[in-house]
């Protein structure tokens, strides 16, 4: 990702958080480390397949850390990396903007 050149610096951020679920995954993982099923419940209507794909993409981008405990039944936890946590002010700014412009549809 660092090798890619963007015509606008915001493109880097948008690439990392684009999609319906990534900002929400970041939001919930900012609260605490979560297991897959808890994260899926928190997100609501996301499918198992979509969440799995989203988490893999975010892990590949260095935003999410996956910890597999190697137990039976499987126990896996997801948390934000420092890079992922650094998106907190970005999401906060998006939240503030949305609240200020609720009337825009």
Image (cartoon, grey):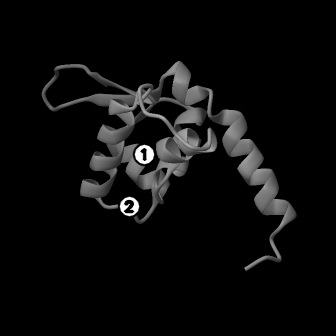
Residue extending farthest right: 100
In this rendering, which labeled residue sits more in front, label 1 or label 2? Answer: 2
Q: Which residue is identified by label 2? A: 46
**Picture layout, residue 100 above or below residue 25:** below
Q: Is residue 25 visible?
A: no
Q: Which residue is identified by label 1? A: 39
Q: Residue at x 33, y 31 (%)?
A: 60
Q: Is residue 75 left or right of residue 4?
A: left
Q: Residue at x 45, y 61 (%)?
A: 44
Q: Position of residue 70 (x, y in %)?
A: 17, 20
**Picture layout, residue 69 above or below residue 50:** above
Alpha carbon distance from label 1 to label 2: 10 Å
Q: Secondary structure at mark 1?
A: helix
First in sequence: mark 1 vs mark 2: 1
The residue carrying pointer 1 sits among few (fewer than 14), some (14 to 19) or many (20 or more) residues within 10 Å by Cα, namely some
Q: Is residue 77 left or right of residue 22?
A: left
Q: Residue at x 62, y 27 (%)?
A: 86
């Amino acid at each position: 990702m660092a090798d890619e050149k963007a015509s606008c610096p915001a493109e880097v951020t948008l690439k990392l958080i684009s999609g319906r679920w990534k900002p929400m995954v970041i939001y919930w993982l900012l609260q605490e480390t979560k297991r897959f099923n808890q994260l899926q419940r928190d997100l609501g209507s996301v499918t198992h397949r979509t969440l799995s794909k989203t988490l893999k993409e975010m892990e590949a981008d260095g935003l999410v850390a996956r910890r597999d405990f190697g137990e039976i039944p499987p126990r896996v936890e997801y948390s934000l990396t420092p890079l992922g946590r650094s998106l907190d002010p970005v999401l906060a700014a998006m939240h503030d903007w949305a609240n200020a412009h609720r009337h825009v549809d």
